[in-house]
């Protein structure tokens, strides 16, 4: 049975930089307030011209991953795309990405587990490759969060957090023992579904979105920040240790930790609980904000380009988010 190796990585973020100071035009906030609570200095948002879509950003990230791998679109056997912000209600953004890449007939799957979407998608891709169903899988995380935020003082707790972008990896079968994905570990607890959610639009109401939904701001995401923080700093270390122990490894064996970039305070809490020194952690939330399903693949591609990921390195990937869901992956580069 083959293992799943990372053949190439890539990412794309919109050129429009939105600083903390820019946000003060819409809401009662300050650069200091945002930095202290989130660690974010700036984020990337798509421009209002509509030129960039999720599928187009995903395509740009995919092209970078293909180039790094020395492959072309024709080498892709299947596509998995993780997002909480699809370009349209249906079909999934993966179908539009498939069209952008010019791959009619290649299967395309959307994954909707929000912040853990990339790791859930990695688990699926790994299973496909291990059983021989597909040999080369494109896995993408992409988000356009900026168009769904309440840019007012009332909505600032959420609005200051999020950015847009896409990250991609090309995964392929390898016979090299001990290389690639060693294991993935997935969890969820739907009892917390409404602690981080967006109520509308909703297929359980008619119409799915109404003027009163906009007026009452039910169309914007809402979060129980205390519950999210408490669970995130507990679950992420827990699920990473689960993955390490499943492979007879310990935290000390990790060469690099890449955690979902939710909030700098959460990342610091996870790092502190695990006892990992800063030089073995890659963070980029200060540049891009929380890009949800795209955050881990963007950070991974960035770390590769910065020379932080060398052949044989042991990496731990971990995420927590809406659902609640949490997941980890342990891999040997």
Image (cartoon, helix red, strand yellow):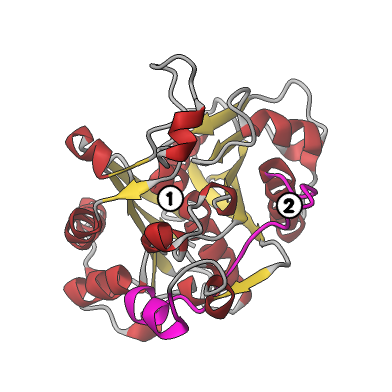
Queried whether the magenta region covers residue 37, the answer comes back as: yes
- Residue 244: percent from the left, percent from the top? 25, 58
Dot in front, 2 or 1: 2
- x and y percent of residue 93 in the render? 63, 33
Mark 2 sits on what residue? 66
Q: Nearer the viewer, residue 177 or 85?
A: 85
| Quadrant of the image containing the N terminus | top left
Q: Is residue 130 visible?
A: no
| Image point (46%, 75%), residue name | 40
* Sequence-earlier tag: 2 or 1: 2
Q: Is residue 103 visible?
A: yes
Residue drawn at 33 percent across, 75 percent down:
37
Cβ–Cβ under 8 Å for marks 2 and 1: no
Seen at 48% across and 68% down, the residue is 27
Which residue ends up furthest to the right in the rendered image?
Answer: 102
- Residue 181: assigned label: 1
Residue 44's image quarter? bottom right
Magenta range is: 29-53
């Amino acid at each position: 049975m083959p293992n799943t190796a990372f053949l190439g990585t890539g990412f794309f973020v919109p050129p429009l930089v939105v600083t903390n100071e820019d946000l003060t035009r819409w809401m009662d906030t300050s650069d200091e307030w945002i930095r202290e609570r989130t660690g974010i200095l700036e984020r990337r948002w798509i421009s209002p011209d509509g030129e960039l879509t999720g599928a187009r950003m995903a395509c740009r990230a995919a092209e970078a991953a293909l180039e790094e791998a020395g492959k072309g679109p024709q080498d892709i056997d299947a596509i998995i795309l993780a997002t909480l912000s699809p370009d349209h209600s249906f079909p999934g953004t993966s179908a539009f990405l498939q069209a952008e890449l010019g791959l009619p007939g290649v299967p395309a799957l959307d994954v909707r587990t929000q912040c853990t979407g990339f790791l859930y998608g990695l688990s699926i891709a790994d299973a496909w490759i291990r059983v021989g169903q597909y040999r080369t899988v494109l896995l993408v995380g992409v988000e356009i969060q900026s168009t769904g935020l309440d840019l007012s003082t009332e909505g600032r707790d959420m609005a200051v957090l999020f950015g847009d972008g896409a990250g991609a990896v090309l995964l392929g079968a390898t016979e090299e023992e001990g290389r690639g994905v060693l294991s993935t570990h997935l969890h969820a607890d739907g009892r917390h579904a409404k602690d981080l959610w967006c109520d509308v639009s909703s297929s359980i109401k008619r119409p799915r979105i109404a003027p009163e939904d906009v007026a009452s701001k039910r169309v914007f995401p809402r979060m129980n920040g205390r519950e999210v923080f408490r669970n995130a700093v507990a679950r992420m270390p827990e699920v990473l240790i689960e993955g390490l122990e499943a492979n007879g490894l310990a935290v000390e064996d990790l060469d690099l930790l890449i955690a979902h970039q939710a909030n700098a305070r959460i990342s610091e809490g996870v790092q502190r609980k695990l006892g990992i020194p800063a030089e073995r952690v890659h963070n980029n939330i200060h540049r891009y904000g929380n890009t949800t399903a795209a955050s881990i693949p963007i950070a991974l591609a960035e770390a590769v380009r910065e020379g932080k990921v060398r052949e044989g390195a042991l990496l731990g990937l971990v995420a927590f988010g809406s659902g609640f869901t949490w997941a980890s992956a342990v891999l040997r580069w």
